Amino acid sequence: MDAVGDSAAERVFLDGRDRLGRVLAYSRRYDFQTGFLNYRPFEESLASLLRNRLTDQQFALLWIEVQNLRQEFLLRGAAGDEVMVRLIAESLRETAGADALLGRFGGSSFLAAMPAAKFNTEDRYRIQTIADGLRIPVVAAGGARPEIAAGAAFYPADTESSPELIRFAGLAAARAAAVRSSAVIPFRPEMNDLILRDFQLELEMHKGLDAGQFSTVYQPKVDLKTGRVLGAEALVRWRHPEQGQVPPNEFVPIAERSGLIHRIFERCLRSALKDAQRWNHQLLDVPVIAVNVSAADVRRQDFVSKVRRLLAEIPIAPTELELEVTESMLVDDEGLFDLRLRQLRAARVRIAIDDFGTRSTSFNMIKRLPLNSMKIDGSFIRGIHRSESLRALCQTVVAMAGSLKLHTVAEGIEDREELEVLRQMGCNAGQGFLFQTPLPAEEFSEFLRQWPVRDNSSFGFTQRMKSSSGHNSQSLSPNL
């Protein structure tokens, strides 16, 4: 190569090296996707902001955790991830304002520092508005609704240290995730202990799953007219050797965040299928066995194939299995869950919407989904005989379900007055302590033998129940 060629090649090399240097320098300070500050530059800028503040000026640090960002990448690829991140960044810039310091940590954590006082109502409302704004644009653009957990820490009310301010905001966001709060949760000193307990509980859960501390219990679903057992709901219980029974509302959110929920679901489904198979062999009539499903399970690509595999491994008729999904799942990501439910129905598995009434699901959405049953949340059942508003709400749900040919099940029935109101309004079935508390499989077998012959006249059933053996009860409607 001649001297001119050598010189041109050298210039290209030097220009490339300079551009690479500028890119590397930029990436050390800023996040490429958003232009927000990375962790170390954000911490340095926050410390400088607090040092140079005006006299008596107060600040808030808002930590927003986008919990389903990784799932969006797995489901829709890099394009889905980029759309969600870009729109979240645009929303933050617009709502946080020009005076906000913005950062992004570890991919799914977005931070905004801004002038605000902890006990100022207008400032707290503004912070909540910033978090709420992140849920809207992504849905409008056709992507999934971001699952937001947000917390805030305040300077100097909570701390005068910038590293602690960041840590406290992160703890508050973690607490918001733990309690599934849609509100921004402010930092409280006891959150250190709560986070430590959650961490310890997760470790104990790992040990408990390996040691067989988790079990499955069953609660019957009863026809409110005839008293016939229409099925059973499988419920997970965890008995810790030292702590005793750990409430599901304590361990389930941790299991969902840690991914342990997948092991718990598979264990529960496997147990339910085995017990249903055994009851069939014993000629004990349990037409449908129901298992709860978490949003984390439904999002997995292998979810439907896992259900099919277990049904093939432990064969019962697919129509004898019902999977219960919560109403919040349908609201948060209708497109994905519609797809999963249709895949399950194609496998002839029944679908129930659980805790109905706790979220604002539209009639048109329910109409489109391939559902079999609708379960009315227990919070609308307690005291229904004393509340006109509860009666009106439940009557509306029952009428809507009837128009869609869906089976209705009332959860949490505890006294005969509630039972009678529900029966009069046409609710098909119910479950609750009035009929039976959840039982281990062997005890539930005995319940099935005794229920048809025991004196249940006080429940007001319209006909004497037939024997639970021999499958001589009338069949469920195909759409039930």
Image (tube, rainbow, N blue to C red):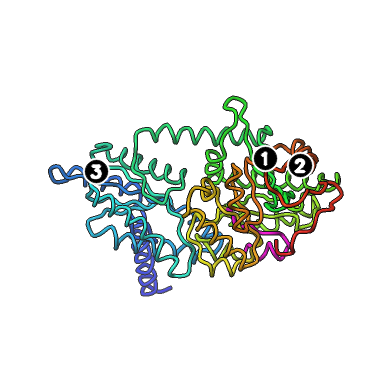
Residue 30 is tagged as none
Q: Amino acid at mark 3?
A: Phe
Residue 119 is tagged as 3
Q: Earlier in the sequence, mark 1 or mark 2?
A: 1
Q: Residues within 10 Å of mark 3 (few under 14, many from 20)?
A: few
Marks 2 and 3 sit apart, C-alpha to C-alpha, by 57 Å
Residue 451 is tagged as 2
Residue 146 in the figure: left or right of residue 217: left
Foreground mark, 2 or 3, reads: 2
In this orientation, which residue lies closer to the viewer: 90 or 235?
235
SS state under label 2: loop
Q: Residues within 10 Å of mark 2 (few under 14, many from 20)?
A: some
Residue 433 horizontal/vertical position (percent): 63, 40
- Is residue 179 visible in the rendered structure shown here? yes
Contact between marks 1 and 2 (CB within 8 A): the answer is: yes
Q: Amino acid at mark 2?
A: Trp
The quarter of the picture where the N terminus appears is bottom left
Q: Earlier in the sequence, mark 2 or mark 3?
A: 3
- Is residue 25 visible in the rendered structure shown here? no
Residue 200 horizontal/vertical position (percent): 52, 32
Q: Which residue is mark 1?
A: 436
| Image quadrant assignment for residue 275 | top right
Residue 146 in the figure: left or right of residue 26: right
Residues in magenta?
A: 340-354
Q: Earlier in the sequence, mark 3 or mark 1?
A: 3
Contact between marks 3 and 1 (CB within 8 A): the answer is: no
Residue 447 horizontal/vertical position (percent): 75, 39
Marks 3 and 1 sit apart, C-alpha to C-alpha, by 48 Å
Does the magenta-highlighted stretch encompass residue 350?
A: yes
